Image: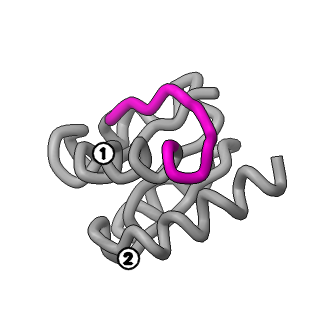
Amino acid sequence: MLINTVCGNGLGSSLILKINVDKILKEIGKTADVEATDVGSANSSGADLLVTTTQFENNLKSTNKEVIYVNNVMDKEDLKAQLVAFFDNN
């Protein structure tokens, strides 16, 4: 499984999200490759899941990929709940 964390340039909030996703996956006993990427590349990536902020919702609404949106990149509990729900449903 490939998870892309997404932000405008792939260098800011996507890196914070990547670190948090990696930690949460370890906590919940799941494995995946996690890569930070920019919003322009997200739709064409081979990712199974995109994780980003609500800021990029309009950019990704036409994607055919599963997307987790967070309001705050530092809110690990919200992100964890959404990742658990994703893995429970897939």
Task: Examine the structure image and report whether residue 67 is included in the region drawn in magenta.
Answer: no
Give the residue at x 20% y 40%: 9
**Which is in the foreground here, disc 1 or disc 2?**
1
Regarding mark 1 in the picture, which secondary structure is present there?
Answer: helix
Among the two numbered marks 1 and 2 on one chain, the one whose residue lies closer to the N terminus: 1
Q: For mark 2, does the 10 Å Cα neighbourhood hold few (<14), some (14 to 19), or many (20 or more) residues?
A: few
Residue 31, above or below 88: above
The amino acid pointed to by label 2 is Asn
Within 10 Å of disc 1 (Cα), the crowding (few <14, some 14-19, many 20+) is some
Task: Name the colour scheme.
Answer: one colour
Tag 1: residue type? Ile
Left-right relation of 56 to 90? left
**Picture quadrant of residue 67:** bottom right
The spot of residue 43 in percent (x, y) is 52, 36
Q: Position of residue 47 (x, y in %)?
A: 57, 30
Asked if residue 2 lies left or right of residue 20, the reply is right
Foreground pick, 13 / 77: 77
**Residue bounds of the magenta highlight:** 26-36
Residue 22: x and y in percent read 41, 42
Q: Is residue 32 magenta?
A: yes
Residue farthest along the left direction in this orientation: 12
Which quadrant is home to the N terminus? top right
Q: Is residue 41 above or below residue 26?
A: above
Q: In the image, which disc is placed on residue 45?
A: none
Q: Residue at x 38, y 30 (%)?
A: 35
Tag 1–tag 2 contact (CB < 8 Å): no
- What secondary structure is marked by label 2? loop
Return the mark for residue 19.
Answer: 1
In depth, the one of 78 and 44 nearer the eye is 78
Q: CA distance from mark 1 to mark 2?
A: 16 Å
- Name the residue at 34% across, 68% down: 55
Describe residue 6's horizontal placement relative to residue 42 as left or right: left
